[in-house]
Amino acid sequence: MIAITGEEKSDYYSSICSAEWAKYGYSVERFEATTPDTLGDQLNFADKKFSGNPFTPTEKAIWYSHFRAWQYVLRNGPANVIEHDTYPMRKLESFGTDEIALFATFPRNDRAWLGREEHIAPGAGYYITKTTASLLIEWALMAPIEQNVDGHIYQSCKKVLNLKQSQFEDYHLKRATCFQIVNYDVGTSAEHNV
């Protein structure tokens, strides 16, 4: 679980979600997130994203948090990666021979965010092997980064699985076992510039 120790919102969400994962028999390993104050220098961000907006410091920190998680998987083997606000609905499926699988959605229901439909939330929950971690790292270092890390994970997953768009969405939505929670009184910890 990617989380920020001592940050109020991250501590709030990670405590709720870790407790719920424990109910399903999972012992969640905490992975300290990168913050805007602890960014690395390995990633080359474009001046602007493909949307035309610049990256926020938080978006860059999220990128580095996942990048470091991929490096961890490359050294230690396959893992399920979740963010601090990823809340389980049931036990994870077995991913068998899959090299990568996405298993989180956002929002959980149509009332959650102004009637938006439920979609895959790539960075909120995914399974990767050493091979896929290597590819995620390689593809991130190939050229200046022009999308948020969720987009990178999503596009990389499509390449690895080689599924058509309609098959890809259905494949992962049917396997979704968790979702990102939001408490509007607490807010979210990520500052996005779509």
Image (cartoon, grey):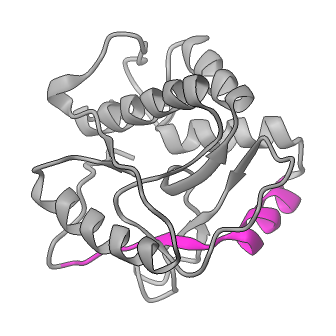
| Foreground pick, 5 / 60 | 5
State which region is magenta.
165-184
Q: Is residue 182 left or right of residue 26?
A: left
Quarter-of-image position of residue 128: top right
| Foreground pick, 8 / 23 | 23
Quarter-of-image position of residue 156: top right
Q: Is residue 6 left or right of residue 33?
A: left
* Residue 17 percent location from the top left of the image: 36, 70
* Residue 20 percent location from the top left of the image: 40, 77
Q: Residue at x 49, y 56 (%)?
A: 124
* Residue 105 percent location from the top left of the image: 56, 68
Looking at the image, is 170 positioned above or below residue 8? below
* Residue 46 percent location from the top left of the image: 43, 17
Looking at the image, is 89 positioned above or below residue 124? below
| Residue 55 makes an appearance in the image | no
Q: Residue at x 63, y 16 (%)?
A: 138
Q: Is residue 179 in the magenta section?
A: yes
